[in-house]
C-alpha cells in the first residue's frame, strides 16, 4: 500500500474500538488504484460532486430569489410543484432505491435538474413560457426524490459508526461548493447589470454543469463492492418483490417508531428557504447583491457542516449520546440567534412595499449592506448545521442501507411537504411577516419534538436489531448482517 493510500485510510478510519466492528466479519480492502477508487471517502466525494452539479446549481438559482427572474411568481409556483411531487414520491423512493439499486436511482434523479434549468432559459428567451417552468418543477420533484434518497442511503452507510459526522461534513462541503460556484458565476456575469434579472449566459452555464452531473453516477462504484475502512462490508441490500419492499415502509416504522418524533424536524428542514431566498434576498437586494449574498450563504454552509460534523458530532472525547445532546443545543441556540436578528429587519418592510415599481433595492456599495449580508451568512450556518445533524441522527439509528433509504425517503418526503406549502403561500403573496413567523415557530417545534427521541433512542452503540429491516409475519425483508456494529467511547 502506498504512503498516500495509507494516509487516506488513516483519515477515513477509526480503531475497531471506536467503530465497534470487532465482532463483524472482516474483509481485506483492495490495494493499488482500486484502493483509492473503492475508498469510502472517494465515493462519498464523488457523490458530493454529483450533488455539486445538480442540486448545487438548483440551490444557486433558487438562492438568487425568483430563480433570477424579475417576477418571482412562476418560480414560487414551480417550487411548490417541485416539493409537492417530491413529498409524494419521496415517501416511496426508498423502496425504488432498494429494488433497482442506489447508483441507478441516483442517475434517474439527476436529469430533472437539467430540464429545470433549461426552463428558466426558455423564459428568458420567450417570456410567455412560464407554464414550462411550473411543469419542469413538477417533473424535477419526482427526480429529486430519487436522487436524494439514493444519496442519503450511500452517505450514511459507507462510514463506520465513528466517522459519520466527518463523512456527512465532507459530502455537505463538496455539495455546497456547487452553490458557491453557481453563485460566483451569477455574481460575475451580472456584476455590471442594471437589470433585476440574470442573463442567458448564466442559465447556459448552469445547464452545462447539470449535464455533467447526469453522467457522473456512471463513474461511481457499485455499493455492493464497498468495504469500510475497518474492513467491514457495507450491508448488501437484497432486492425482493415490490410488494415486499412497500411492506418495508411499515416494517421500518414498526421496528423504529421513535423516528416519528423527527418528522416535525424533517418537515421544517426546507421550510426556511422561502423566506431567506425570496422574501429577504429576493425582496431587498439588487441582482448583483443577491448573487454575492448567495455566494456568502453557500460558502458559510461548508464551514457550518464541518464545525458541527467534525468538531461536535464526531468528537472522540465524548460518548455518542453526549455528542447528540451537544449538537441539539448548538442548533437550538443558532435558531434563536438568526431569527431574532432577522425579525428586526423583517419588521421594517412589507411585500407591498418591496414589490412596488421603483422600490429601492440594497446594493453592495450601500452602507447598510454589510449588516444584511452577515444575516445571510448566519442563515447558511444554521441550514448546514440543521441538515448535518438530521442526517447524523438517522445514521445513529442504523447502518443498514435498506433501512437508511427508507429513513431518507421519509426525511425528503416530509421536508418537501413543508417546502411545497410555504412556496405555495409565497406564490399566493402571503405577507412576509406571516411566512417569517411560521418559519421561526416550525424550526423551534422541530427541535423540541426531536429532543425526546435523542434522549431515548440515541445509544452509545448500534444494536443488532437496528441494523436491518427484520423478519416480520413470515416475510423475509432484508438478510441480517453477520453481527452488530457498535461504537464504544
Image: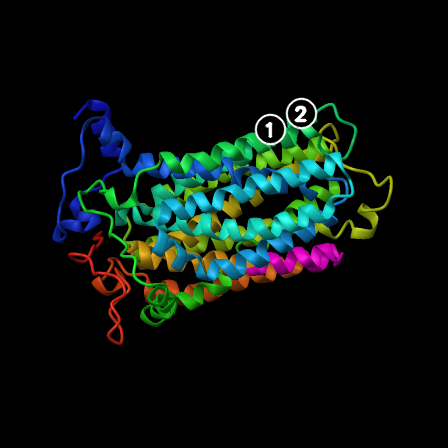
Q: Are marks 2 and 1 in contact (CB under 8 Å)?
A: yes
Region in magenta:
417-435
- Residue 483 picture location, percent across and down: 16, 57
Element on which disc 1 rests: helix
- Residue 438 picture location, percent across and down: 64, 61
- Residue 113 picture location, percent across and down: 55, 42
Residue at point 53% right, 38% down? Answer: 56
Is residue 341 at least partly visible in the picture? no
Residue at point 56% right, 37% down? Answer: 57
Label total for image: 2
Q: How is the image coloured?
A: rainbow
Closer-to-camera residue (438/61) = 61
Task: Please tell me whether residue 7 is drawn above or below residue 470 in the rendered image.
Answer: above
Disc 2 crowd rating (10 Å Cα; few below 14, some 14-19, many 20+) is some
Quarter of the view holding residue 434 = bottom right
Residue 394 on the magenta span: no
Could you tell me which quadrant the N terminus lies in? top left
- Residue 485 picture location, percent across and down: 20, 54
Left or right for 238, reference 95: left
**Residue at the farthest bottom position:** 473
**What is the C-alpha distance between the residues marked 2 and 1?**
10 Å
Residue at the disc numbered 2 = 189
Tell me the tag on residue 205.
1
Amino acid at each position: 500500500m502506498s504512503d498516500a493510500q495509507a494516509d487516506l485510510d488513516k483519515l477515513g478510519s477509526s480503531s475497531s474500538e471506536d467503530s465497534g466492528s470487532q465482532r463483524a466479519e472482516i474483509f481485506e480492502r483492495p490495494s493499488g488504484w482500486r484502493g483509492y477508487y473503492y475508498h469510502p471517502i472517494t465515493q462519498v466525494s464523488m457523490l458530493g460532486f454529483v450533488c455539486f452539479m445538480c442540486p448545487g446549481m438548483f440551490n444557486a438559482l433558487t438562492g438568487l430569489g425568483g430563480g433570477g427572474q424579475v417576477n418571482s411568481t412562476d418560480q414560487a409556483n414551480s417550487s411548490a410543484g417541485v416539493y409537492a411531487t417530491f413529498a409524494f414520491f419521496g415517501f416511496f423512493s426508498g423502496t425504488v432505491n432498494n429494488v433497482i439499486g442506489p447508483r441507478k436511482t441516483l442517475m434517474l434523479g439527476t436529469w430533472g435538474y437539467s430540464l429545470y434549468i433549461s426552463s428558466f432559459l426558455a423564459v428568458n428567451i420567450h417570456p410567455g413560457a412560464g407554464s414550462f417552468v411550473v411543469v419542469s418543477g413538477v417533473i424535477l420533484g419526482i427526480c429529486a426524490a430519487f436522487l436524494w434518497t439514493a444519496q442519503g442511503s450511500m452517505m450514511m452507510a459507507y462510514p463506520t459508526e465513528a466517522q459519520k459526522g466527518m463523512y456527512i461534513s465532507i459530502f455537505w462541503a463538496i455539495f455546497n461548493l456547487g452553490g458557491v460556484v453557481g453563485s460566483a458565476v451569477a455574481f460575475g456575469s451580472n456584476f455590471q447589470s442594471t437589470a433585476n434579472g440574470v442573463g442567458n449566459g448564466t442559465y447556459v452555464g448552469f445547464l452545462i454543469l447539470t449535464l455533467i452531473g447526469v453522467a457522473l453516477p456512471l463513474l461511481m462504484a457499485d455499493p455492493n463492492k464497498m468495504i469500510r475502512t475497518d474492513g467491514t462490508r457495507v450491508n448488501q441490500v437484497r432486492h425482493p418483490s415490490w410488494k415486499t419492499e412497500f411492506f418495508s415502509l411499515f416494517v421500518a416504522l414498526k421496528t423504529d417508531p421513535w423516528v416519528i418524533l423527527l418528522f416535525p424536524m424533517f418537515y421544517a428542514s426546507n421550510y426556511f428557504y422561502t423566506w431567506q431566498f425570496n422574501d429577504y434576498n429576493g425582496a431587498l437586494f439588487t441582482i448583483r447583491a443577491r448573487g454575492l449574498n448567495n455566494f456568502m450563504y453557500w460558502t458559510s454552509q461548508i464551514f457550518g457542516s464541518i464545525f458541527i460534523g467534525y468538531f461536535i458530532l464526531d468528537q472522540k472525547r465524548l460518548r455518542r449520546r453526549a455528542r447528540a445532546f451537544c449538537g441539539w443545543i448548538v442548533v437550538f441556540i443558532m435558531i434563536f440567534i438568526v431569527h431574532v436578528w432577522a425579525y428586526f429587519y423583517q419588521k421594517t418592510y412589507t411585500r407591498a412595499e418591496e414589490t412596488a415599481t421603483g422600490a429601492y433595492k440594497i446594493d453592495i456599495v450601500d452602507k447598510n449592506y454589510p449588516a444584511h449580508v452577515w444575516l445571510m451568512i448566519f442563515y447558511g450556518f444554521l441550514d448546514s448545521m440543521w441538515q448535518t445533524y438530521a442526517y447524523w441522527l438517522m445514521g445513529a439509528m442504523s447502518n443498514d442501507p435498506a433501512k437508511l433509504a427508507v429513513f431518507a425517503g421519509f426525511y425528503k418526503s416530509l421536508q418537501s411537504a413543508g417546502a411545497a406549502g410555504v412556496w405555495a403561500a409565497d406564490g399566493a403573496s402571503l405577507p412576509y411577516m406571516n411566512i417569517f413567523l411560521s418559519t421561526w415557530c416550525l424550526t423551534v417545534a422541530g427541535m423540541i419534538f426531536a429532543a425526546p427521541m435523542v434522549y431515548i433512542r440515541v445509544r452509545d452503540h448500534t444494536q443488532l436489531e437496528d441494523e436491518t429491516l427484520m423478519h416480520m409475519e413470515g416475510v423475509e425483508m432484508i438478510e441480517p448482517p453477520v453481527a452488530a456494529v457498535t461504537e464504544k467511547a
